[in-house]
Amino acid sequence: MKVATANVKETLDATKAGAALDAVLATAPQIVGLQEWRKGRASVLASRGQVYRLPRLRKRLGRKPASSGYVFGYPLGGGPPIGVDAAWGELLTVRTIRLAPGSKKVRPTLATEAIIREHATGLLHIVLNFHLLAHHDRAAYLAGWKIGRAKAIQWVDSWAGFTRWVFGDTNDHLMGLPPLTSCWQGNPLEPTLGRRTIDNVYGERKAVSAHAFNTPSDHDAVVADYPTKEHR
């Protein structure tokens, strides 16, 4: 199984953002998380797949789920999109998770939760995609980052017993997210922004491989491979 995460700088225009997304999708991940993907880029997603804001509504309307290409969950309440290879799995739900409150000084930390059902096994994959605060030299930002990380750990614990994934820009070099395992653990370390490795995938088990690769964004994207038979 292959998963990927990418911070696509919010100031990139649609053409460059699309090129970054194309580079990520070219690695053929089953699940992908995108950060700094503002609402104005919804059309970029729609040109490369289907965009679901309320997957349950689609079911109530009797519309069949996509069977090929990518489906992107983009919650109405805010939060970064999560993409799923429709030939591999079905996006069942998507919703906004508030990891940290905002203030006059800092933005709120809005994450996205998705529940995905794998076609071949019926296994449910529970996914969180986040972008934690940077600028830790500023007290308010550091406090928001700590709250966001703690809330993410609480989220992981709340789904104990399920197959959990967390994708994102942690804004902290090799940040831990117990009890999940970083894709970089046991693999050669590769920086994703400057000299730091702050972009990460966390899963139930160790990744067989993890690689950072260049896109038009300032961050390198990350793709990680997991053995399907060993991943519960």
Image (tube, helix red, strand yellow):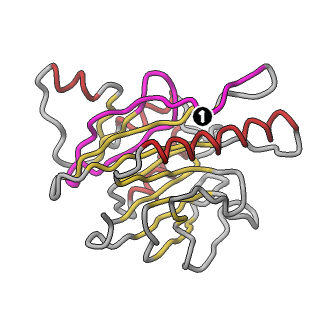
The kind of residue tagged 1 is Leu
Q: In this view, does 224 lie to the left or right of 107?
A: left
Q: In which quarter of the image is residue 104?
A: top right
User: How many numbered marks, from 0 up?
Assistant: 1
Residue at 82% across, 45% down: 136
Depicted 205 relative to depicted 164: above or below: below
Q: Is residue 69 left or right of residue 102?
A: left
| Quadrant containing the N terminus in the rendered view | bottom left
Is residue 185 within the magenta segment? no
Residue at 55% across, 79% down: 186
Is residue 95 within the magenta segment? yes
Q: Position of residue 82 (x, y in %)?
A: 41, 42
Q: In this view, does 61 lie to the left or right of 81?
A: left
Q: Where is residue 126 in the image (x, y as percent from the top left)?
A: 37, 46
Depicted 206 relative to depicted 45: above or below: below
Q: In which quarter of the image is residue 74?
A: top left
Q: Nearer the viewer, residue 152 or 190?
A: 152
Residue range of the region highlighted in magenta in the rendering:
74-103
Residue at 39% across, 56% down: 25
Q: Position of residue 51 (x, y in %)?
A: 33, 33
Q: Quadrant of residue 137?
A: top right
Q: Which of 214 and 16 is in front in this view?
A: 214
Where disc 1 sits, the SS reads: strand
Depicted 95 relative to depicted 13: above or below: above
Residue at 32% across, 57% down: 30
| Quadrant containing the C terminus in the rendered view | bottom left
Q: Mark 1 points at which residue?
A: 99
Depicted 64 relative to depicted 29: above or below: above
Q: Nearer the viewer, residue 123 or 55?
A: 123
Q: Where is residue 41 in the image (x, y as percent from the top left)?
A: 49, 33
Q: Which of 205 and 154 is in front in this view?
A: 154
